[in-house]
Amino acid sequence: MTITISKTEGGLSGDSNTVDLPEHVREQLEICFHNIRIRPTSHGYAFILFLVLLLFSAIYYLNSIAFILCFLLISLLHNVFWLSYRNIQGLQIMPCATESVFSKQTAYFHFIVFNAEHYEREAIAIQWQNGPISFADIAANCYVEFSVRVPTKHRGYLKPESFQFFSCYPLALLECRCEFDFQQGVIIYPHPANQYPSVQSVQQSSRQKSHLSQGQDDFYQLRSYQAGDSLKHIAWKQSTKFDHYYTKEFQGEISDEIYSVNWEQSAHHGEKHCLAILTAQILDISTNDKPYELHLPYIHVSAGTGLAHRHRCLTELALCKIESENEGVSDRSNIIGLIELKQ
C-alpha cells in the first residue's frame, strides 16, 4: 500500500475561513479534543528519562544551575505539548467518492484534510495499518488531498479498517494521533476471464421497427446527458460550444433482441471461474451497447444498457453468494443500501 498526496489552495470567500472544496465530498469529521491521543515518541521517552535523572541529580547535589536547566526543559516540553495539540486540533477530514475496481487491481481511497485556521499546519501525516507514512504541510485556509492506494485480492465489498492521522510537530517528542472510520467501502468486481464463450440472444423477432436509440443508425436529435450514457455517444463539439453535455440519439430499424448473461450456462466451471466468465461477457456486451440481462441464483437483473446498468450487473456479481438464498440476498441488500446512503 502506497500513499500519494496533492496540495491545492482554495479560493477564499470574503473574510470567512471557507474554500471551494470538491463537490464529491460527502461528510466530514472535525478533529477535536475527544478523539486526539497524545503520547511520547521514542525520543520523547528518552527526553523524559533525561529530565528525571537531571532532577534527581539537582536534588542530590543541590545544584542551582541543574535546577534551572531542569525547569527550563520542563517548560520546553510543556510548550511542545501545546504546539503539538494545536497543530492537529480543528482539522476537518472529509472522504471523497471511491470508484469500484476489479479484483487484483488497486483501489483508491481519497481524503481531503482542510485547515480552516489562519496559521499553517506542519507535518500532518496519514497512515493505514502498518503501511508507509506520508507527510504534508497545510497552509492557512487550504486543503490537501490524500490518495491512499489499497491493493485488492478478492471480489466483494472492501472496507478498510480505521485510518490514522497524526503529527509529531514540532520536535518529534510527542505524537498527536486521531483514528477515524467513515464506514467507507468500495465494490470489488470479479476479475474477468481471458477466455469465455460468446453470449447468445434469448429473444429475437424478425419484426422491424422504427426505434430511438443511441446506436449507429440515422442521427435523430440531441438531448441532455444523463448518468449512464455511453461516452462514445456524447456530442463533444456541441457540448464544448454550449458548456453543457449532450448525447446523440439515433433513429433506425433494429431487431427486438436481448442477450442473456446466465449463471447456468457456466456453472459447471465452478463459482470463481463462472463469475469471471460472466464478468467478461458483461464487459464485452456493454462495449457494443447491446441490451442484456443477468440471471444469477435468486437474483435477476432486467435488460438494459449503459454504464449504470453495467455497474449494477457487476455489483451483483461482486456481492453474489450461492450457498444460501436468504443469506446472499440479505447481505447484498444491506451493502447496496449502505452504498446508496453514502451517495
Image (cartoon, rainbow, N blue to C red):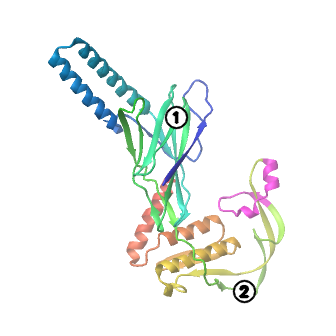
Residue with the mark numbered 1: 137
Residue 91: where, in percent of width, then height?
Answer: 46, 35
Q: Tag 1: residue type?
A: Asp
Q: Are marks 1 and 2 in contact (CB under 8 Å)?
A: no
Give the residues drawn in magenta, as a range.
222-242
| Residue extending furthest toward the right | 218
| SS at badge 1 | strand
* Vertical comparison of 231 with 78: above or below: below
Q: Is residue 335 visible?
A: yes
- State which mark lies toward you, 1 or 2: 1
Reply above or below: 255 against 139: below
Q: Which residue carries the number 2 mark?
A: 205
Q: Which of the 4 image quadrants contains residue 260? A: bottom right
24 or 176: nearer the viewer: 176
Among numbered discs 1 and 2, the one appearing first in the sequence: 1
Give the percent coordinates (x, y) of residue 306.
66, 67
Residue at image coords 45%, 45%? 133
The total number of labels drawn is 2
Residue 273 screen position, x and y as percent? 51, 79
Left or right of 267 in this view: 196: right
Q: Residue at x 47, y 83 (%)?
A: 270
Mark 1–mark 2 distance (CA, rounded to whole Å): 64 Å
